[in-house]
Image (cartoon, grey):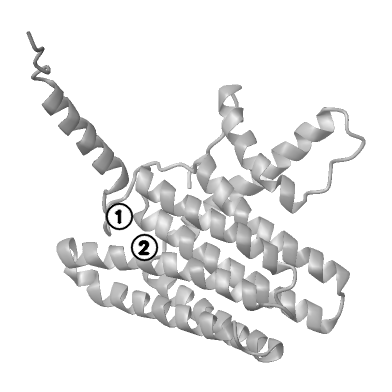
Amino acid sequence: MPIEPAASSGPATGRALQLFKDWFWRPPRPHGETIVDRRVSPLELLYDLAYATVIAQAGNHLAAHLSANGFFEFVVVFSLTWIAWANGSLYLELHGRLDGRTRTYFFLQIGILAILAVYAGDAGSGGGGFAIAYTAFLVVMTWLWYEVRLEDARLHPEFLIDTGRYVAAMAVSVVVILVSAFLPAELRLMVWAIYTVAWVFLLLLFGHDNLDWPDRIGGRLRVLVDLLRRRRRQITEAGWSRPRQLDAGSLPNYAFDCGRGSRDGQPDRARA
């Protein structure tokens, strides 16, 4: 006699699909939906350290090419990296969630940043690869901010003008950086320099209307500095005659050390 499937299998499957949908397909956090006492997670520290890797690679190039032109190249690459970090961090602070969707997008950005770090050491003379990788990062961020605008159209139409302008600025950035990949090296650096100045003014203008986000992002920097100091102290107490030099390859380990610290009874998070 055939055995009929349990009647509860249908509802159980439906609940599982709903949980999966909620974890990976939830829309971004809308404007005004503040997470009270939100704390910096190990993933966010790993995200920050990915940017530190890019800067470290650019710094290594500067150390090997100490000149006025080399310093200018480093300043430009550093500024581009800072703008990318500010953009990603701003999105996470205002619209990110602790769900699969946000984490997937941020792991994608970390992968792009790893490619960016490969080209950061030679971004001045051979910056085509750097520009293309940076364009890929901007495409991801443009899509994320566009999704925010879609949520504003549904829940907060009063923010449509601001988010529309921001998405337009991101789209223009994609075009500018992509075109710069095919320009001569000197002209490419000048385009990047103008781009960074324009974005600094844009971020300052945005920060003037959102006075709390610089302090919240600054909290993440304080957590990162505290983490590196603690790691340096641990290395010293372990018997090293002097702390090892921080290099690009070892940077991600610091974020995971932060996560292990909580299991040892040490605080691994701080308020953002």
Report crowding for label 1: few under 14, some 14 to 19, many 20 or more residues within 10 A (C-alpha).
many
Residue situated in front as seen by the camera: 72 or 270: 72
Secondary element at tag 2: helix
The label number, if any, that marks residue 28 in the structure image? 1
Relative placement, left or right, of 17 versus 165 is left
In the picture shown, does residue 180 fall above or below 21?
Answer: below
In the picture shown, does residue 99 fall above or below 143?
Answer: above
Name which residue lies at 59% across and 88% down.
Answer: 191
Residue situated in front as seen by the camera: 42 or 136: 136
Disc 1 from disc 2: Cα separation: 8 Å
Give the percent coordinates (x, y) of residue 79: 62, 73
Q: Quadrant of residue 165?
A: bottom left
Give the percent coordinates (x, y) of residue 39: 46, 41
Q: How many marks?
A: 2
Q: What residue is disc 2 on?
A: 144
In the picture shown, does residue 74 fall above or below 218?
Answer: below
The disc labelled 1 sits on which kind of residue?
Pro
Residue situated in front as seen by the camera: 146 or 165: 146
Query: Do the CB atoms of the residues marked 1 and 2 lie less than 8 Å apart?
Result: yes
The disc labelled 2 sits on which kind of residue?
Leu
Name which residue lies at 66% across and 70% down.
Answer: 78
